[in-house]
Image: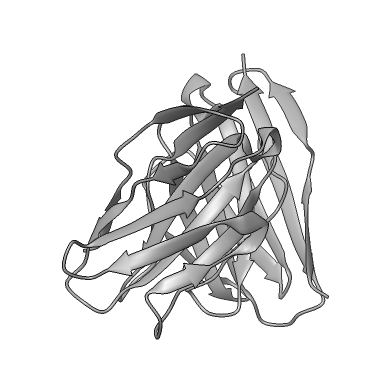
Amino acid sequence: AQSVTQLDSQVPVFEEAPVELRCNYSSSVSVYLFWYVQYPNQGLQLLLKYLSGSTLVKGINGFEAEFNKSQTSFHLRKPSVHISDTAEYFCAVRGSEKLVFGKGTKLTVNP
Amino acid sequence: SQTIHQWPATLVQPVGSPLSLECTVEGTSNPNLYWYRQAAGRGLQLLFYSVGIGQISSEVPQNLSASRPQDRQFILSSKKLLLSDSGFYLCAWGRDRNIQYFGAGTRLSVL
């Protein structure tokens, strides 16, 4: 079975600072990996996905993530965050069965 | 383009009352449909998914049920709500099981 661990439940940062949200997964089969963002009282929106190919994946809103098979990680990064990036971020993995989500990381960007 | 509609946005119901949440998808046919529940600090829990009309798979034994009476309609129901049914309910659709698109959610408070 697949599982996802998001190592930080909350990440506070200052505006224009870089940020990294950590995600580790476990799976016994080839994986597809995703990051979603959820703004308050809204549904989830796909930020980026890794299905195959280049391990560095670029998404919307300036975010990127790197798939590291040896470390079973898929960390999300942004070089300079904005106030509007304040939201909850979910990592997800799809192995041979359904999509499995992590518990989320709340990113708070302070002025 | 495809859109997903979910209503109502918020709902306050007394314990023991029935529930019906509706989700419809436009702009696509034969989508896979999903119901998730999101409780504070617990991430997303997959409740039900459907790969076709009348085909429902339940992920978690609970007080809820789902139905798919039409290709692009997915309904979440309960005969008698419990306090523990409170949460944020999200409907999603996907063309395959790798990428899922989410509705805006329903905030259910059972009092």
Q: Position of residue B33 (x, y in %)?
A: 60, 66
Q: Is residue B72 left or right of residue B32?
A: right
Observer-nearest of A73 and B94:
A73
Indicate whether A64 appears above or below A95: above
Q: Position of residue B79 (x, y in %)?
A: 59, 37
Nearest to the observer: residue B69 or residue A42 = A42
Give the residue at x 76% y 80%.
Answer: B28
Q: Position of residue A100 (x, y in %)?
A: 37, 57
Q: Which image quarter is the C terminus of chain A in? A: top right
Residue B5 lies in quadrant: bottom right
Q: What residue is shown at x 42% (from left), y 71% (from top)?
A: A56
Quadrant position of residue A62: bottom right
Looking at this rendering, what residue extends furthest in the bottom direction?
Answer: A53
The x, y position of residue A108, in whole percent, is: 55, 28
User: In this view of the protein, which residue sits in the foreground, B7 or B98?
Assistant: B98
Tell me the colour scheme of the image.
Answer: one colour
Q: The N terminus of chain A is located in which quarter?
A: bottom left
| B27 to the left or right of B13 | right
At 39% from the left and 83% from the top, the residue drawn is A52
- Residue occupying the point 40% across, 81% down: A54
Res B1 quadrant in image: bottom right
Can you say whether B35 is above or below B28 in the image? above
Instruction: Describe residue A106's horizontal placement relative to residue A42 as left or right.
Output: left
